[in-house]
Image (cartoon, rainbow, N blue to C red):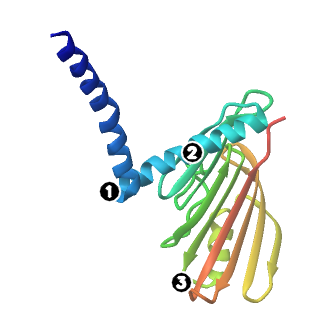
Amino acid sequence: MRLFTIFGEIRINVIRTIVPFLAFCFLISGGCDKAKDAIAEKAAEKLTEKMIEKETGKKVDIESSDKSISIKTTDKKGNEVRLETGAQLPQDWPKKIPVYPGAEIEHSLAVSKRNYTISMLTSDSQSKVIEFYRSKLSELKQEAQMDMGEQKMLRLKGTLEGEEMVVTIVANRDADKNKTMIMIAIEIKASE
């Protein structure tokens, strides 16, 4: 009876260790691409978090998906600092600054709740894009305007949604895609 118990325990321990190991090997070797990608993505997130934490001495949280990456940490004062990238409007994008009608968001970037950038594509002309934003953001003061043929720029400054901000709109002809690339950069000034 004792001999059977020992062999039974060994068999159970082998099953407990070998089966998960074989399943892991199966996933890594291409047995399941989605699971393999998810494992690799999480491992990359954790490795990157540890590298940033080692360099900065701050706790870092990274989340990623097939369309975006979000990095969260804190600044010297303990305030949350967030960096987001992706192909959708940033989470805290100022509501009074519209996405150009019918445009497709290509890229976005948000750094905390102070700086945002998005790029979009539209089939409309650069002039039409600039006029749209000039009329929609008329409560902001025009600070600069440039017309360089294929590229047009409008820089506005003032208060929107109770925040002092600078908004820069650039409309550039993308010859490869035969569309107009719109880039909007927003800098929200810190309250003093």
Residue 126 - label = none
Mark 1 residue type: Gly
Q: Which is nearer the eye, 82 or 59?
A: 59
Give residue 31's mark: 1
Q: Residues within 10 Å of mark 3 (few under 14, many from 20)?
A: some
* Residue in view at x 71 percent, y 35 percent: 53
Distance between mark 1 and mark 2 Cα atoms: 22 Å
Which residue is located at x 76 percent, y 89 percent? 149
Crowd class of label 1 (few under 14; some 14 to 19; many from 20; radius 10 Å): few
Could you tell me residue 175's position as x and y percent? 63, 89
First in sequence: mark 1 vs mark 2 = 1
Residue 45 is labelled as 2
Hey, which quadrant is residue 151 in on the image?
Answer: bottom right
Q: Amino acid at mark 2?
A: Glu
Q: Secondary structure at mark 3?
A: loop
Give the residue at the far top of this rendering.
2
Badge 1 element: helix
The answer to whether residue 2 is left or right of residue 138 is: left
Q: Which residue is mark 3?
A: 123
- Judged from this view, the residue extending furthest toward the left is 1
The residue mark sitting in front, 2 or 3, is 2
**Up-down: is 175 above or below 41?**
below
State the image coordinates of residue 154 (x, y, percent, origin top left): 76, 71
User: Residue 49, percent across and down?
Assistant: 64, 40
CA–CA distance between discs 2 and 3? 37 Å
Q: Amino acid at mark 3?
A: Ser
In depth, the one of 87 and 101 nearer the eye is 87
- Left or right, 2 with respect to 65, comes to left
Identified at 69% across, 80% down, the residue is: 172
